[in-house]
Image: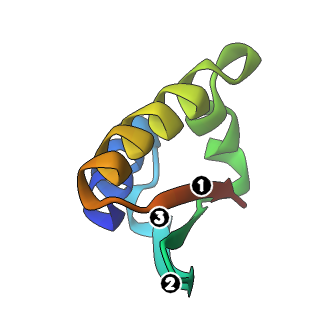
Amino acid sequence: MKELVEYIAKNLVDDPDSVKVEETQEEQGFVSVTLEVNPQDKGKVIGRQGRVAKSMRTLLRVMAVKDDVRVNLEIL
């Protein structure tokens, strides 16, 4: 899941070197993914009315069903 978020974010932002993604196992069956980008690129990752972020969360949810876990994406 981490690789997917990192790939999408790096292709959206102007400064791909500033993209940092962390994946942590919170508890049994729950994964938390944290995406950190340059503050100037934050709008590109979130998108208009949050459409890009919502799409990323949807893709993560599809991957999570395959792995039988729940996932949460946090954008910093």
Between disc 3 and disc 1, whose residue precedes? 3
Q: How far apart are marks 3 and 2 (CA)?
A: 20 Å
- Tag 3: amino acid: Val
Mark 2 or mark 1, earlier in chain: 2
Q: In which quarter of the image is the C terminus?
A: bottom right
Residue 46 coordinates in the image, percent (x, y): 65, 33
Residue located at (34% from left, 47% from top): 65
Give the secondary structure at mark 3: loop
Measured as percent of width and height from the top left, residue 21 is found at 47, 70
Q: Is residue 26 left or right of residue 62?
A: right
Callout in the foreground (3, 1) = 1
Report whether 44 appears left or right of 69.
right
At label 1, counting other C-alpha atoms closer than 10 Å, the crowd grade (few under 14, some 14-19, many 20 or more) is some
Q: Distance between the residues labelled 2 and 1?
A: 13 Å
**Could you say which quadrant of the image residue 17 lies in?**
bottom left
Q: Split into 4 quadrants, where in the image is the N terminus? A: bottom left
Q: Residue under circle 1? A: 73
Residue type at mark 2 is: Gln
Q: Is mark 2 on a helix, strand or loop?
A: strand
Q: Assign a secondary structure to mark 1.
A: strand
Up-down: is 6 above or below 11?
A: below
For disc 2, the marked residue is 25
- Horizontal arrangement in the rendering, residue 44 relative to residue 74 (left or right): left
Q: Which mark is residue 19?
A: 3
Q: Do the residues labelled 3 and 1 touch (CB within 8 Å)?
A: no
Q: Which amino acid lies under the numbered mark 1 shown in the image of this protein?
A: Leu
Question: Residue placed at 69% from the left, 15% from the top?
Answer: 48
